[in-house]
Image (cartoon, rainbow, N blue to C red):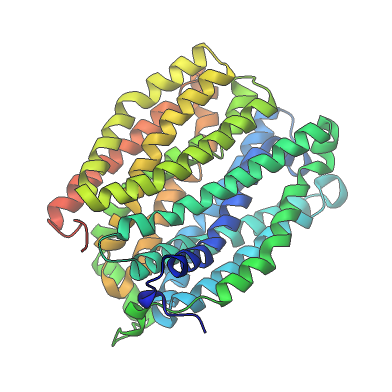
C-alpha cells in the first residue's frame, strides 16, 4: 500500500502522486493534439470533399463535436466521481478515453468502408469528449485536495503542465516521421503511427491509476451526495457555473489556438514547412510547461485575482497585434516569438485559473461543478477554435483574424473574474 496523499510528506512521494494522477491527462492531450496536427491527412482519409477548405472544415467540425460531449460527461461522470471517490472515477474516465483512442487509431479510411469510416471517427471523438468532460475536473480536484497547505496553486497547475509533456512527445514523434517518411506515406498511413503509440501506453497509464490512493479530504467527508443531489446543487449554483465557464474561456481559446491549431495555421495559412510548424509547437509546449507552475506558485504568493486580471488585459491588448505582425512577415522566427508570447499569457493565466475554479465551487459538487464549467467553456470557446479560426480567415481574408477570437475570450474571462470576486470576496485568496 502507498501512503495516503494527504499524509505524503516526503517530496518524492508527493511527486509520485502527482505523476500517477496526471498520466491520464497526458493521454488525452496527446490524442487531441495529434488530431489537430494531422487534420489535413485525416481530412483526406476520412472526409474527402471537393475543396480543401470543405474537407478541413468537416474534420475540425468532428474534432469540435467531441467537445460538445464534454458537458454531458462533466455532469454524469463528475457526479459519479463526487459520489464514489476520485480514484474509482478517474479509472472509469481513463477506460472510456482509451476506447475512443483505439477506435480512431484502427478504423479504416473512407476508400475502404465508405461513410462508416467518418461515422466511427465521430464515435471515437464523442467517447473521448465524454471522458474528458470529467477527467480534467477529477484530476484538478485530486491535486487540490492532496496539496501541501499554502501551495495549492502550484500543485494544481500540474494538471495542465502534464498535458504540455504530451504535446512535446507528439510534436517530436511528428518531426521524426516527417524526417523519415515522404508526404505521400504520411498521408496514406504514417499519420496513424503516433496514434498507435498512444494505444501502446494505455496499459502503463492504467497501472499508474490503479495505484492511486483516495484523498483524505474525500475520505473524511461525512455525506456523499447522490446523483440527484449533485444535479440539484449544480442547478442552485448555476450562476457560479456560468461565471466559471467564462473564467475558463481565456484558457481554452488560447490553448487550442497555440497548440492544436498552430501546426495547421503554420502550414496552410502562413505556408511554412511542416518541420518549422512542428518545432514551433514543440517550443510552445515547453514554454507552457514552464509558465504554468510559475503562474500557480505566484498565485499562491500574491493571490489569484492579480494574475487573472493582468493576463486577460494583456491578451485583449496584444493578441491581434501580435498575430498581425506574424501574418505580415511569416517566418519561423516570427511564428516562434509570437506564439511564445501567447504561451506566456496562457501559462500564467491558467496557472492561477485552475486552482481558482476548484476554490469557487461548492465542496460537495466540486468535481461536477469544476468539470461542467470547464467543459462548457471548452465546448463553446476551445474545441471549435480551429474551425472558428479557419472560418474567420476564410471570411475576412485576414490571416491574423484568430487574434480577435482570443481577445474576445479574454474579455469574457475578465468579466467573470470581476463577477466571481465580487460575489465571493476573499474566498479565492491563497489557502494556507
**Pick the front one: 10 or 378:** 10
Q: Position of residue 62 (x, y in %)?
A: 61, 47
Query: Residue drawn 29% across and 41% down?
Result: 412
Image vertical order of residue 382 relative to residue 325, above or below: below
Q: Residue furthest right?
A: 112
In the rendered picture of this protein, how many numbered marks are placed on residues? 0
Q: Position of residue 300 (x, y in %)?
A: 25, 53
Query: Residue drawn 13% across and 57% down?
Result: 426
Image vertical order of residue 334 relative to residue 370, above or below: above
Quarter of the image with the C terminus is bottom left
Query: Residue drawn 62% across and 31% down?
Result: 279
Q: Residue furthest top?
A: 328
Q: Is residue 99 visible?
A: no
Q: Position of residue 153 (x, y in %)?
A: 32, 56
**Pick the front one: 416 or 168:** 168
Q: From the viewer's perspective, is 241 left or right of 423?
A: right
Residue 231 falls in which quadrant of the image?
bottom left
Residue 357 falls in which quadrant of the image?
bottom left
Q: From the viewer's perspective, is 363 left or right of 404?
A: left
Q: From the viewer's perspective, is 167 left or right of 420?
A: right
Query: Residue drawn 46% across and 70% down?
Result: 13
Amino acid at each position: 500500500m502507498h501512503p495516503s496523499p494527504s499524509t505524503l510528506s516526503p517530496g518524492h512521494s508527493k511527486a509520485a502522486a502527482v505523476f500517477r494522477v496526471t498520466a491520464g491527462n497526458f493521454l488525452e492531450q496527446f490524442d487531441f493534439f495529434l488530431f489537430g496536427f494531422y487534420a489535413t491527412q485525416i481530412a483526406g482519409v476520412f472526409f474527402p470533399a471537393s475543396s480543401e477548405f470543405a474537407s478541413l472544415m468537416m474534420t475540425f467540425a468532428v474534432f469540435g463535436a467531441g467537445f460538445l460531449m464534454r458537458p454531458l460527461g462533466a455532469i454524469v461522470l463528475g457526479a459519479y466521481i463526487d459520489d464514489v471517490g476520485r480514484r474509482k472515477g478517474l479509472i472509469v474516465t481513463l477506460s472510456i478515453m482509451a476506447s475512443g483512442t483505439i477506435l480512431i487509431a484502427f478504423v479504416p479510411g473512407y476508400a475502404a468502408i465508405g461513410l462508416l469510416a467518418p461515422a466511427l471517427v465521430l464515435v471515437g471523438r464523442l467517447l473521448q469528449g465524454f471522458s474528458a468532460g470529467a477527467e480534467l475536473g477529477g484530476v484538478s480536484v485530486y491535486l487540490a485536495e492532496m496539496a501541501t497547505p499554502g501551495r495549492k496553486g502550484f500543485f494544481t497547475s500540474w494538471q495542465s503542465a502534464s498535458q504540455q509533456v504530451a504535446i512535446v512527445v507528439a510534436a517530436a514523434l511528428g518531426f521524426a516521421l516527417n524526417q523519415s517518411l515522404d508526404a505521400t506515406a504520411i498521408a496514406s498511413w504514417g499519420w496513424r503511427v503516433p496514434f498507435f503509440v498512444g494505444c501502446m501506453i494505455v496499459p502503463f497509464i492504467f497501472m499508474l491509476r490503479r495505484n492511486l490512493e483516495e484523498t483524505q479530504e474525500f475520505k473524511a467527508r461525512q455525506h456523499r451526495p447522490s446523483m440527484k443531489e449533485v444535479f440539484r446543487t449544480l442547478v442552485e449554483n448555476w450562476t457560479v457555473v456560468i461565471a466559471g465557464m467564462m473564467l475558463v474561456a481565456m484558457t481554452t481559446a488560447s490553448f487550442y489556438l497555440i497548440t492544436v491549431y498552430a501546426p495547421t495555421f503554420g502550414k496552410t495559412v502562413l505556408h511554412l514547412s511542416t518541420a518549422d510548424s512542428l518545432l514551433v509547437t514543440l517550443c510552445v509546449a515547453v514554454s507552457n510547461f514552464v509558465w504554468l507552475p510559475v503562474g500557480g506558485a505566484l498565485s499562491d504568493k500574491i493571490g489569484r485575482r492579480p494574475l487573472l486580471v493582468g493576463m486577460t488585459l494583456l491578451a485583449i491588448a496584444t493578441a491581434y497585434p501580435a498575430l498581425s505582425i506574424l501574418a505580415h512577415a511569416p517566418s519561423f522566427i516570427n511564428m516562434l516569438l509570437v506564439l511564445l508570447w501567447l504561451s506566456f499569457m496562457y501559462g500564467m493565466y491558467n496557472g492561477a485559473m485552475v486552482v481558482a475554479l476548484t476554490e469557487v465551487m461548492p465542496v460537495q459538487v466540486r468535481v461536477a461543478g469544476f468539470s461542467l464549467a470547464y467543459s462548457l467553456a471548452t465546448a463553446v470557446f476551445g474545441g471549435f477554435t480551429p474551425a472558428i479560426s479557419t472560418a474567420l480567415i476564410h471570411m475576412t481574408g485576414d490571416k491574423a483574424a484568430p487574434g480577435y477570437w482570443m481577445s474576445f475570450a479574454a474579455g469574457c474571462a475578465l468579466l467573470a473574474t470581476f463577477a466571481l470576486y465580487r460575489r465571493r470576496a476573499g474566498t479565492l485568496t491563497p489557502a494556507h
